[in-house]
Image: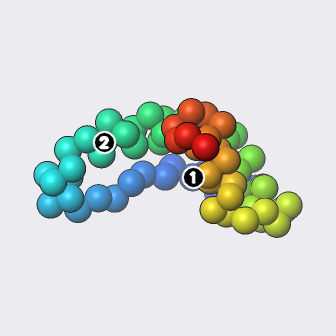
Amino acid sequence: MQPIYAPAPIIREVTLKAHPNIPALLNPVFATLDGPTLQKLNARIAVEGQDAKKVAANYLKDNGFIKN
């Protein structure tokens, strides 16, 4: 049985005040991170041995959150 993941960004209030666009940028990303997606991403790292940074970058690129 795998634990249930519910990732959420933690950002200091002073940072949010200085950069009020952060929630608009992060909310769409976190909305896509449901249980099955997180399991697949974690399996690529834990089971397949892929690099976590590359897995994350590929996910963000594949879903249109960042450009190549």
| 3 relative to 26 in the view: left or right | right
User: Count the marks: how many?
Assistant: 2
Q: Amino acid at mark 2?
A: Pro
Q: Quadrant of residue 43?
A: bottom right
Which residue is tagged 1? 5
**In this picture, residue 14 sits left or right of residue 28:** left
Can residue 30 be seen in the rendering of this structure? Answer: yes
Whichever of labels 2 and 1 marks the residue nearer the N terminus, that label is: 1
Question: Could you say which is closer to the camera, residue 41 or residue 2?
Answer: 41
| Residue 57 screen position, x and y as percent | 62, 52
Query: Does dot 2 land on a helix, a strand or a loop?
Result: helix
Q: Residue at x 52, y 38 (%)?
A: 65
Using the numbered discs, state the Cα–Cα distance from disc 2 to disc 1 in whole angstroms: 20 Å
Quadrant into which the N terminus falls: bottom right
Which percent across, then down, holds residue 11? Answer: 29, 59
Q: Which mark is residue 39?
A: none
Look at 51% across and 49% down and name the residue there. Answer: 6
Q: Is residue 24 above or below residue 11?
A: above
User: Disc 2 designates what residue?
Assistant: 23
Quarter of the image with the C terminus is: top right
